[in-house]
Amino acid sequence: MTDSARMLLDLLHLEPLEVNIYRGQNRDLGSSRVFGGQVFAQALVAARRTVSEPREAHSAHGYFILPGDLAAPIVYFVDRLRDGGSFTTRRVTAIQHGQTIFNLSASFHIDEPGNEHQSEMPQVPPPEDLAPELQLIREMADRIPEPLRTVLTQDRPIDFRPVNPVDPFRPVPPHAPVRHVWFRAIGVLPDEVMFHQAVLAYASDYGLITTALQPHSLTFRSRGLQMASLDHSLWMHRRFRVDDWLLYAMDSPVAAGARGFARGTIFTRTGQLVASVAQEGLMRVRPPSPPTP
């Protein structure tokens, strides 16, 4: 396992402080605040740590309330709302500096057979035919502002391979709000289902809302653009491994009121639909400042 993959697993190994209370650390991804996928994944792990039976998460819904401070650990309080015959429900509150920065509701279900159907996986090139996103970023390192260069070009625990890469530092022509990205964790992860679900939760927030920028000639590094995840929902339909290739198919059906909405489906390489995602995010473009007289 690579050092960066080990670092990701360390982020998910929360420190128990008391019954139903856990503490997690942070990793800087270059956004000046805690990555939303990290908080979502850690909250999901905190919830799962209070579920004693072999039940797996099938849905999780979170609201991002305040930006997370990279310099301070995050404390997670878990409320045990219900332990039913088939389903377990938990609520998690993430705290920094005495304030709630994130809320999560999660539901866990016993393994149960039932009817099945699914949408078809999009036809896209295989991951072996695509360049890793990290390689593309390192090739443009001379155009990355110096304070961000080291962070953005650091080794990553997840290999993302976009089908149609976008240069975040250059304007792009308007194009359809659709993205396809292959991803997998680098190295072999433990077999415990919770870790695979948590890493998928982490990855599911990566680049999803930027799909809503594509019809507007914007990238997440565009001048004057303010972006932030507002909420995030994840449904997990079947078991999967995130150390095998997964295809993240994303689209954005609408943007309005300075908010963008995006959704995604995640498939195994063999075409099984294993998870669905939805997110709304702030997408505010500030007008340029008037020239100084």
Image: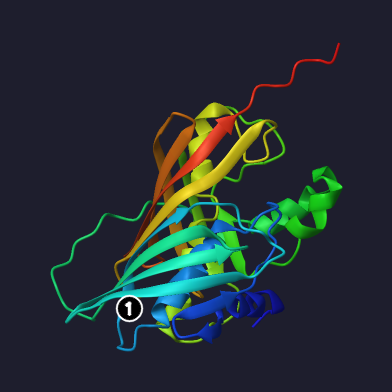
Label 1: element kind: strand
Amino acid at circle 1: Glu
Q: Which residue is mark 1?
A: 56
Q: Quadrant of the rendered structure where residue 60 is?
A: bottom left
Residue 115 picture location, percent across and down:
13, 68
Residue at 34% from the left image edge and 88% from the top image edge: 52
Q: In this picture, is 163 found above or below 61?
A: above
Q: In this picture, is 13 found above or below 134?
A: below
Whether residue 153 sits left or right of residue 52 in the image: it is right
Residue at 19% from the left image edge and 79% from the top image edge: 84
Q: Nearer the viewer, residue 267 or 85?
A: 85
Residue 115 visible? The answer is: yes
Whether residue 145 sits left or right of residue 231 in the image: it is right
Residue 186 picture location, percent across and down:
60, 74
Residue extending furthest top? 293
Residue at 61% from the left image edge and 37% from the top image edge: 226
Q: Nearer the viewer, residue 275 or 126?
A: 275
Which quadrant: the C terminus? top right
Badge 1: few (under 14), some or many (20 or more) residues near its Cα, within 10 Å? many
Q: In this picture, is 128 found above or below 171?
A: below
Which quadrant: the N terminus? bottom right
Residue 291 picture location, percent across and down:
81, 15
Q: Nearer the viewer, residue 40 or 78?
A: 78
Residue 61 picture location, percent across and down:
37, 59
Residue extending furthest left? 115
